[in-house]
Image (cartoon, rainbow, N blue to C red):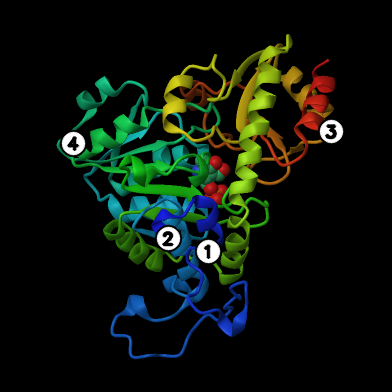
Amino acid sequence: MTQQSMHIETKLIHAGEPESRIEGAVTLPIFQSSTFQYAGQDHYDQLKYIRMNNTPNHIALHQKLAALENAEAALVTASGMAAITTTFFALLSPGDHFLVQDCLYGGTLDFINSDFKTLGVSFDFVNGNEPDAWTSQLKPNTKAIYVETITNPLMAVADLKAVAAFARNHRLISMIDNTFASPINFRPSEWGFDLSLHSCTKYLNGHSDIVAGAVIGREDLIQKIAHKLIHLGGSLDPHACFLLHRGLKTLAVRMKHQNVSALAIAKFLAAHPSVETVNYPGLDTYTGYHLARKLLDGFSGMLSFEIKGDVSAADGFIARTHIPISAPSLGGVETLITRPVTTSHSGLSPEEREAAGISDRLIRLSVGLEATEDLIDDFNRALT
Ligand code: PLP
């Protein structure tokens, strides 16, 4: 059986593992060595050194991640933001113009809003669901387009097939932050995207115990990004590589549970009289449901909602829940609850948040691996 023909569950366990087991070890050991013996390398990037991202722990992860998304290559980084910003630094130059989806993770949006000026890169926001409008936003110097598979925190799903086709037709580099979907629910290369970016801190590691990132996609672009990463220094430590490698092996079982559990919770919330709106692409009442069904294999464990009343009603609800932990971040085994205005999107001004459609009372939930029934009971009590 070739690796290409394996199911993703099998690739999670076996892709990228050393051909012959090191000393028979079933699990790839941690190579906690900053430097390695010189072996005649004739290029700086090939010297074996942690910052060059080429220890056995890095190489195994690169191969596994590329295999998961059926892509040519992959690169791990010290955080999701390191993956995103290093990609921008590597592929955008002063004078370039960039098209960006109008509702993104707060850290990415804040970087674009505040740091692109210094880089000399101009940008315009696009509505991910209005492909007919994108052509009018093109400029002769437009270089790339950037979207998220499922946006944070409103869970919008753009017309992703149209994004990849638009980029191809206009010779733009297409980039997508695939953190919320994970390769279980969406594999960007299969839809024609050039690059997929991840905060591996979330679903890919899945245990809320490391910060890590990845870029997956076209080999020529990954090489450029890897070279820039060597200069910027945002390399992942081998011990964190090991934890990410371990976490990845259970991604399929975790994500499948989270897909099912989040859908049940979204349905419960949508039917509750104290709940005003629920944002979850798997609800057939949600705008974009039919598009999401065509694109995604599952809708992820993330949802957001507003309950009736003001901000204090939202805070009261969060305080009355027992199981979820009130904390930023997502994608772990424990259910996390947060108001994005106080955490993931607190770096944006009130005007920027309003423009992105993020209200002060919006609550975001990252569904963990607890029993769905216990979570629903907990929410029911906290709502009543
Ligand atoms: N992309 C998305 C969608 C995120 O939610 C986050 C963090 O919350 C990031 C990127 C940044 O990742 P990290 O915190 O690993 O730098």
Can you tell which mark lies on residue 14?
1
Task: Give the CA separation, mark 3 to mark 4.
Answer: 51 Å
Q: Residues within 10 Å of mark 1 (few under 14, many from 20)?
A: some
- Residue sitting at 70 percent across and 34 percent down? 337
Q: Of label 3 and label 1, which has the lower sequence position?
A: 1
In the depicted view, which residue is nearer to us: 151 or 72?
Answer: 72
| Percent coordinates x, y for residue 205 in the rendering | 60, 54
Dividing the picture into quarters, in which one does residue 218 lie?
bottom left
Task: Give the CA separation, mark 1 to mark 4.
Answer: 36 Å
- Residue pointed to by mark 4: 169
Task: Give the CA separation, mark 2 to mark 1.
Answer: 9 Å
For label 2, the SS is helix
Q: Of label 2 and label 1, which has the lower sequence position?
A: 2
- Residue sitting at 58 percent across and 20 percent down? 359
Q: Amino acid at mark 1?
A: His
| Percent coordinates x, y for residue 352 in the rendering | 48, 27
**In the displayed structure image, the side of residue 138 where residue 164 appears, left or right:** right
Closer to viewer: mark 3 or mark 4 = 4
Answer yes or no: do the residues labelled 2 and 1 have beta carbons within 8 Å?
yes
Task: Give the CA separation, mark 3 to mark 1.
Answer: 38 Å
Closer to viewer: mark 1 or mark 4 = 1
Q: Amino acid at mark 2?
A: Gln
- Residue pointed to by mark 2: 3
Q: Amino acid at mark 4?
A: Asn
- Residue pointed to by mark 3: 322
Taking the image as drawn, is residue 234 in sight? no
Q: Of label 1 and label 4, which has the lower sequence position?
A: 1
- In the displayed image of the protein, which residue is found farthest to the top? 273
| Percent coordinates x, y for residue 207 in the rendering | 68, 52
| Percent coordinates x, y for residue 163 in the rendering | 31, 33
Dividing the picture into quarters, in which one does residue 241 lie?
bottom right
